[in-house]
C-alpha cells in the first residue's frame, strides 16, 4: 500500500510537470469564478493531454489540471460548473485531507473498517463539493448536465488526486435532480448513515439510469436521446410529474420519452392526449405528441409545440384512429437544450364536436409528420384558397420571420417492389418568398434504420417565388433497403404549396 501511495504521488508530480499553460480564456474563466465566489486567488490552472477528468493535484501547492479534450467542445456553462466543483475541493482543503487519508490507509490497510470509512469519506467529500458548486452555479441541473457529460469520458483519477468524476457519478447526478432529499449535517456516524439513505431513496428519480429502471407510468427515454437527456420523476410537483432535460456536451440533439399502447380499444374513434406542460429555457423546441401506427407505418402524427420559458399550461393533440391502426404512441419531445416538465398526462375518447388538431393530410391521401430541427417554426394545412386542377393542395409555411433552422414533412412506406431499382419521386410545387431553400427529398433506410441512399435537392434548391411546376428526382434504392422515407423540406422563411407526391418506378 505504501508503494501504491508513493506511485500515485509520483504520477501526479509527472502530470504537473507535463502539463502546459491553460489558454487565456480558460484562465480568465477560472480567475473570474474564484473572485465571484469571494475567495483568494486560485492556484494555477493547466492543460494536460490524456487526462480523463478535471482534477486538483498536489497538497502543498495544488494545481488544477484540465483535460485537453474537455476544453473546447464542452459548453462554457458546464465547464464552469466542473471548475466550481474543483474550487470547492481547494476551499475545503481537501487535497491535504486526502493526503492524510492515504497515509492512514497505508498504515491500517489490513482493517476492513478503514476501507469502508475511507470510501464513505471520499463519497461524502464529492457530495459536499457538488452542493457547494451547485450553490455557486445557482442551478443544480447545470452541474448535473456537466457531470453527465463527464460520463462520455472514461475515468481514471489517481488516488492521490481529487477529480470531478470521482465517486459514484450516477448517484451524484441523481441527487441534483428535482425532488431529491436535502442534505443534513449531523455527527459523523449518523451523517454517513443518512447519506446511504439519501442515495437509496433517490435512485428512483432518474428513470433511465439502468436497463432495469422503469417509469411506473410506462414512459421511457428512447434511442440516442438516452445519452444526452434525462427523464426523471419530479415528485416535488406531483406523483405523475416528469421532467425531460438536456444533459449532453453538445448543444443539440433530441430527447424523446414515449409510451406505447395497443390501439384496438380506440379504433374508429377520436382520441385526445393532454397534459400540463411547463417549458424552461428551451432554445429549439419541445412539445407533447401523439402518433398512430398501422400495418405500413405512421398513419397520423401531431405535436403541440412549445419554446422558451413559461408557466404551467394544459396542451394537447387530437387524432382520429383508423380501423386498421395497431399502436398508439404518446409522449414528449425536447430538441436542443432546456427542460420540459409534464404533469397529469391523460388519454381519452372525444366526440366529433372536438376538432382534430391534425392538418397534414389530403383527403384519402398521404399522412405527413412535421419534423426538422425547428418544427415549431412551421405549419402545414390544406389551403382553402388554393387548388390545382380542382384538387386540394397542402400549404407548408414558416410561422416566423427567421426560423433559425428547417422544417420538413415526412412520410414513409416499406420498400416492397421498389427494392434494387431506381425510384422517381414527383410532385407539383409552387413557392413564395423562400428566403433559404426548399425541395423534395427521398431516403432509403436499412432494416436497422441506417441511411443507405439519400437526396434532398440541396444541389438544385428551390428558391424565391415561382409558379406551379412539376418537380422530379430519382434515387437508386439498394437491395438491402427495408423502408423509404420521403417528403418536402423548407430551410428558413417562406411558403411552399404542393400536391400529394408520387413514388413510381423509373425507367431510364
Image (cartoon, rainbow, N blue to C red):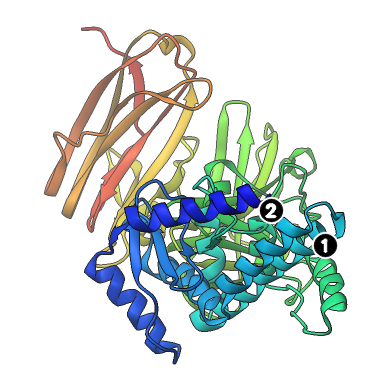
Is residue 402 among what the camera can see? yes
Q: Mark 2 highlights which residue? A: 271
Say if 420 sits above or below 7 in the image. Answer: above
Disc assigned to residue 200 = 1
Give the residue at x 58% y 80%.
92
Q: Quadrant of residue 462?
A: top left
- Quadrant occupied by the C terminus: top left
**Is residue 44 found left or right of 467 in the rendered image?**
right
Q: Position of residue 317 (x, y in %)?
A: 59, 58
Q: Residue at x 41, y 12 (%)?
A: 418
Q: Residue at x 35, y 68 (%)?
A: 45
Q: Position of residue 414 (x, y in %)?
A: 50, 21
In the image, is residue 50 above or below residue 216? above
Work out whether residue 219 or residue 149 is closer to the camera in this orientation and state it.
149
The relative height of residue 158 versus residue 45 in the rendered view (above or below) is: above
Left or right placement of residue 280 versus residue 235 in this view? left
Q: Which mark is residue 446?
A: none
**Which residue is pictured at 46% across the width and 35% down the height?**
365
Q: Could you tell whether 11 is left or right of 456 in the image?
A: right
Describe the element under mark 1 as helix, strand or loop. Answer: helix
Q: CA distance from mark 1 to mark 2?
A: 39 Å
Q: Residues within 10 Å of mark 1 (few under 14, many from 20)?
A: few
- Crowding at label 2, few (<14), some or many (≥20) Cα neighbours within 10 Å? many
Task: Give 183 or 19, whichever is nearer the viewer.
Answer: 19
Q: Residue 445 falls in which quadrant of the image?
A: top left
The x and y percentages for residue 175 are 69, 68
Pinpoint residue 502: horizontal percent, then vertical percent: 35, 26
* Depth check, front residue: 48 or 317: 48
Seen from the viewer's position, the closer of residues 123 and 346 is: 123
* Quadrant of res 38: bottom left
Considering the numbered disc 2 on the image, is that residue within a helix, a strand or a loop? strand
Amino acid at each position: 500500500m505504501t508503494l501504491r501511495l508513493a506511485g500515485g504521488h509520483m504520477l501526479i508530480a509527472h502530470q504537473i510537470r507535463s502539463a502546459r499553460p491553460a489558454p487565456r480564456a480558460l484562465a480568465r474563466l477560472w480567475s473570474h469564478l474564484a473572485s465571484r465566489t469571494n475567495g483568494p486567488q486560485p492556484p494555477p490552472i493547466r492543460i494536460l493531454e490524456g487526462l480523463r477528468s478535471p482534477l486538483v493535484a498536489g497538497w502543498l501547492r495544488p494545481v488544477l489540471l484540465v483535460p485537453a479534450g474537455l476544453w473546447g467542445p464542452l459548453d462554457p456553462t458546464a465547464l464552469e460548473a466542473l471548475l466550481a466543483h474543483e474550487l470547492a475541493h481547494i476551499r475545503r482543503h481537501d487535497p491535504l485531507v486526502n493526503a492524510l487519508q492515504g497515509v492512514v490507509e497505508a498504515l491500517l490497510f489490513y482493517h476492513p473498517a478503514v476501507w469502508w470509512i475511507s470510501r464513505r469519506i471520499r463519497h461524502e467529500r464529492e457530495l459536499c463539493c457538488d452542493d457547494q458548486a451547485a450553490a455557486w452555479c445557482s442551478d443544480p441541473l447545470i452541474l448535473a448536465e456537466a457531470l453527465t457529460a463527464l460520463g462520455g469520458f472514461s475515468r481514471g483519477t489517481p488516488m492521490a488526486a481529487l477529480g470531478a468524476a470521482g465517486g459514484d457519478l450516477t448517484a451524484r447526478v441523481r441527487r441534483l435532480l428535482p425532488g431529491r432529499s436535502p442534505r443534513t449535517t449531523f455527527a459523523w456516524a449518523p451523517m454517513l448513515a443518512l447519506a446511504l439513505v439519501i442515495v437509496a431513496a433517490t435512485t428512483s428519480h432518474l428513470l433511465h439510469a439502468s436497463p432495469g429502471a422503469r417509469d411506473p407510468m410506462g414512459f421511457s427515454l428512447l434511442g440516442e436521446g438516452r445519452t444526452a437527456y434525462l427523464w426523471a420523476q419530479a415528485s416535488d410537483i406531483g406523483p405523475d410529474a416528469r421532467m425531460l432535460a438536456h444533459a449532453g456536451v453538445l448543444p443539440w440533439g433530441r430527447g424523446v420519452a414515449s409510451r406505447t399502447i395497443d390501439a384496438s380499444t380506440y379504433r374508429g374513434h377520436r382520441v385526445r392526449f393532454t397534459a400540463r406542460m411547463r417549458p424552461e429555457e428551451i432554445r429549439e423546441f419541445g412539445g407533447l405528441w401523439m402518433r398512430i401506427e398501422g400495418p405500413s407505418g405512421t398513419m397520423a402524427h401531431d405535436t403541440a409545440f412549445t419554446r422558451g420559458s413559461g408557466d404551467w399550461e394544459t396542451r394537447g393533440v387530437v387524432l382520429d384512429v383508423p380501423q386498421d391502426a395497431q399502436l398508439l404512441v404518446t409522449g414528449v419531445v425536447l430538441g436542443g437544450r432546456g427542460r420540459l416538465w409534464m404533469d397529469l398526462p391523460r388519454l381519452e375518447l372525444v366526440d366529433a364536436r372536438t376538432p382534430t388538431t391534425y392538418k397534414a393530410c389530403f383527403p384519402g391521401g398521404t399522412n405527413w409528420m412535421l419534423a426538422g430541427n425547428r418544427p415549431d417554426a412551421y405549419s402545414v394545412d390544406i389551403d382553402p384558397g388554393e387548388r390545382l386542377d380542382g384538387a386540394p393542395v397542402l400549404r407548408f409555411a414558416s410561422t416566423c420571420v427567421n426560423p433559425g433552422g428547417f422544417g420538413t414533412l415526412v412520410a414513409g412506406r416499406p420498400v416492397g417492389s421498389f427494392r434494387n431499382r431506381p425510384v422517381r419521386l414527383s410532385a407539383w410545387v409552387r413557392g413564395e418568398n423562400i428566403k433559404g431553400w426548399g425541395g423534395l427529398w427521398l431516403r432509403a433506410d436499412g432494416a436497422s434504420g441506417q441511411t443507405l441512399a439519400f437526396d434532398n435537392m440541396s444541389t438544385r434548391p428551390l428558391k424565391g417565388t415561382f409558379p406551379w411546376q412539376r418537380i422530379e428526382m430519382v434515387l437508386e434504392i439498394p437491395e438491402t433497403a427495408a423502408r423509404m422515407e420521403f417528403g418536402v423540406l423548407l430551410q428558413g422563411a417562406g411558403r411552399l404549396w404542393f400536391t400529394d407526391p408520387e413514388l413510381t418506378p423509373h425507367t431510364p
